[in-house]
Image: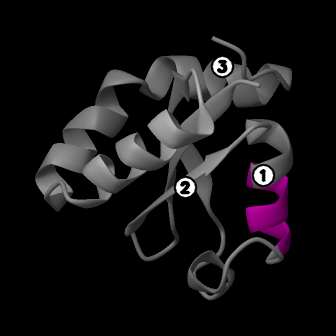
Amino acid sequence: MKWTVYLLRCADNSLYTGITTDVSRRVQQHRAGTASRYTRSRLPVNLVYQEAQASHSLALKRELSIKRLTKQQKEKLASQNQEFTECSIAQGTTKR
């Protein structure tokens, strides 16, 4: 099973990091307010970064490493993937 690490930009401009096996479904859950307490109070959210990982373990490790980054480093990471993410969400696909 393929896992994905993702970053969401919240309405307050904060960045939320998570992992999932289905990015489209998870983003919709966040947007509906049913995915996490953090994003529920910071709607709307937009996907700004995603990165495929080979296993659940690797995804968790990468998620933790991203969470440890400074806001500036996360912003840089998000800007590197912005075009792909916008295109994927618009077309309803999230595969890399």
Sequence-wise, which precedes: disc 3 or disc 2?
A: 2
The answer to whether residue 48 is visible is: no
Residue drawn 74% across and 65% down?
30
Q: Which residue is mark 1?
A: 26
| Circles 3 and 2: CB atoms closer than 8 Å | no
Residue drawn 52% across and 72% down?
11
Q: In this orientation, which residue lies closer to the viewer: 22 or 12?
A: 22
Q: Amino acid at mark 1?
A: Arg
User: In the image, residue 53 lies at what x, y percent?
Assistant: 53, 25
Which label lies toward us, 1 or 3?
1
Q: Amino acid at mark 2?
A: Gly
Q: In this orientation, which residue lies closer to the viewer: 54 or 50?
A: 54
User: In the image, residue 59 lies at what x, y percent?
Assistant: 50, 39
Which secondary structure class fits the magenta region best?
A: helix
| Circles 1 and 3: CB atoms closer than 8 Å | no
Pick the quarter of the image with the C terminus.
Answer: top right
The answer to whether residue 4 is above or below residue 12 is above
Mark carried by residue 71: none
Give the spatial CA distance, label 1 vs label 2: 9 Å
Q: Which residue is mark 2?
A: 18
Residues in magenta?
27-32
The answer to whether residue 1 is above or below residue 69 is above
Residue 47 lies left or right of residue 31; in this view the side is left
Choose top left, top right, bottom left or bottom right for residue 55. top right
Residue 88 lies left or right of residue 83; in this view the side is right
Residue 65 lies left or right of residue 56; in this view the side is left
| Circles 1 and 2: CB atoms closer than 8 Å | yes
User: In the image, residue 26 lies at what x, y percent?
Assistant: 78, 52
Q: Which residue is mark 3?
A: 87
